[in-house]
Amino acid sequence: MSERSFPATTAVVLGGSHTGMLAARALAAFAGRVVVVDRDELPDGPEPRKGLPQARHAHMLWSGGMRAVEELLPGAAGALRAAGARRLPVTTDIVAMSAKGWFRRWPESHHVILAGRDLLDATIRARVLADERIELLGGTEALGLTGTASAVTGVRVRTGGAERVIEAGLVVDATGRGSAASRWLTELGLPAPERREVDPGLAYASRLYLAPEAARDCFPIVNVQPGPRGGGPGRAGFLLPIEDGRWIVTLSGTRGGEPSPADEDFVRFAREELRHPVIGELLERAEPLSGVSFTRTTVNRRHFYERMPAWPGNFAVLGDALAAFNPVYGHGLAAAAQSALALREVVRRHGWGTPGLSRRVQRAVARPVAAAWELAIAQDVFYPGATEQGPTLRDRLLSAYVDRIMHTATGNGRVARRVTDVTSLERGAHVLLAPSMLLAAAAGPLRPALPGPPLTPEERKAAGIS
């Protein structure tokens, strides 16, 4: 069965999570109808969903991504805050230990939005689906594309055992890490895209806690990053304050240094396996609200669709379907939002249905992805077994410079601000290569290293640690 209601002005978005909803919103101003297809029946509120197991882990939306969300959905930031999401200034409310030492808590340069993934998705989904031009087709699986190597004409779907075709003027794949886009394109007669994988063998374990009462309304992010690269595994931990006075804590380790999935080992790993025991110390006074959620599917994988010699009309790939990052770095949500905004801007500039539109879209959405990709693999490529060939010369040169910049940032506020420009996806990594940054990196930090985590006396008292 084929569904033919005005196919030329219909957009189909495959995947109803963060990326898919924002892509649907981006297209609503140009398409006569936007259909979001998801294999799950999506919940009405902030509830778990089967197709998003990573929702049980820590998530953050950096200000570069939040800015893009707000462009697409005016008022979204306020709605998230009203629903309980936290807005923390960067780096004022971040207590972080880098490979080069503890960062100072400098005045606010950017910010980060913290919330449970269920709350984040539900808030954005509700605002997107309030648009009558957008409809959700839940409980429906995408089976493949229709069309030819030169142009996609629609998508084959299955709902409750019944198959049909939804014809469309544009199909967007936002199905995440499990995307079949590469296979679908080869089935249309196109060559397989170039792909790169960097797999540090990362596993991560997360658990929800109720913060001590005095720390429920105001507490910083606490982050212990892996140590200097030395050929061994890297271990890290994040404590993020989220809605309802809770902390979500994620512990991670690369191949050979993985955390245990056992509840009884969680605090021990935080105290004994990380480079500093502060997260474990904080958890001693917090109340566990869940068991440990454990995940291994964390390979960095990027498809270079923008480099393909030929690209079909009426098709685009966004989000984790395009590039999936090690989630520990927290850039997936922001890069997806910026890609959705790029989608809107390209369609606005060139017009719906114009020749070559989807190729322009694919090149445009690759730009924010490239920035997040470089941040993700800069560390991961050095872990044993991460790639078959090991780090390239470019990887080694870039890493040596970034190490110097990070060392300088521990004691230089201006350099720290430029680092957060990049990590918050507000600006590209090129700002770290400005002449002033090169000189600062050569000079090193202006202030001495901190001896320990820069928690204030009030924060220590609220958390119940000395």
Image (cartoon, helix red, strand yellow):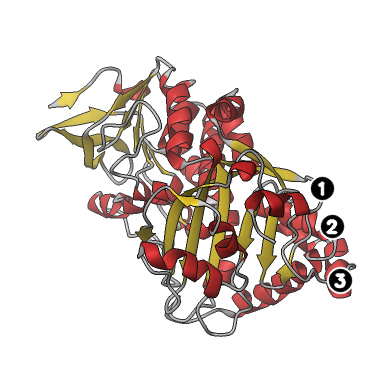
Q: Amino acid at mark 3?
A: Pro
Quarter of the rendering occupied by the N terminus: top left
> Horizontal and vertical percent for residue 308?
43, 56
Mark 3 vs 1: CB contact within 8 A: no
> Horizontal and vertical percent for residue 116?
48, 41
Residue on which the image places disc 1: 107
Query: Residue 59, can we see it?
Result: yes
Please tell me whether residue 114 is drawn above or below residue 72 in the rendered image: below
Q: Nearer the viewer, residue 32 or 47?
A: 47
Please tell me whether residue 132 is drawn above or below residue 393 in the rendered image: above
Q: Amino acid at mark 2?
A: Gly
Q: CA distance from mark 2 to mark 3?
A: 12 Å
Q: For residue 448, which numbered disc appears in the image?
A: 3
> Horizontal and vertical percent for residue 190?
31, 54
Q: Residues within 10 Å of mark 2 (few under 14, many from 20)?
A: many
Residue at 41% x, 36% y: name it.
20
Residue most extreme to the left: 161
Q: For residue 413, which numbered disc appears in the image?
A: 2
Residue most extreme to the bottom: 231
For marks 2 and 3, the one nearer the N-term is 2
For marks 3 and 1, the one nearer the N-term is 1
Mark 2 vs 1: CB contact within 8 A: yes
Q: Which mark is nearer the camera, 2 or 1? A: 1
Answer left or right for 297 relative to 402. Answer: left
Q: Nearer the viewer, residue 101 or 459?
A: 459
Q: CA distance from mark 2 to mark 1?
A: 8 Å
Which SS class for mark 1? Answer: loop
Q: Nearer the viewer, residue 419 or 152?
A: 419
Which SS class for mark 2? Answer: helix
Which SS class for mark 3? Answer: loop
Residue at 34% x, 49% y: name it.
53
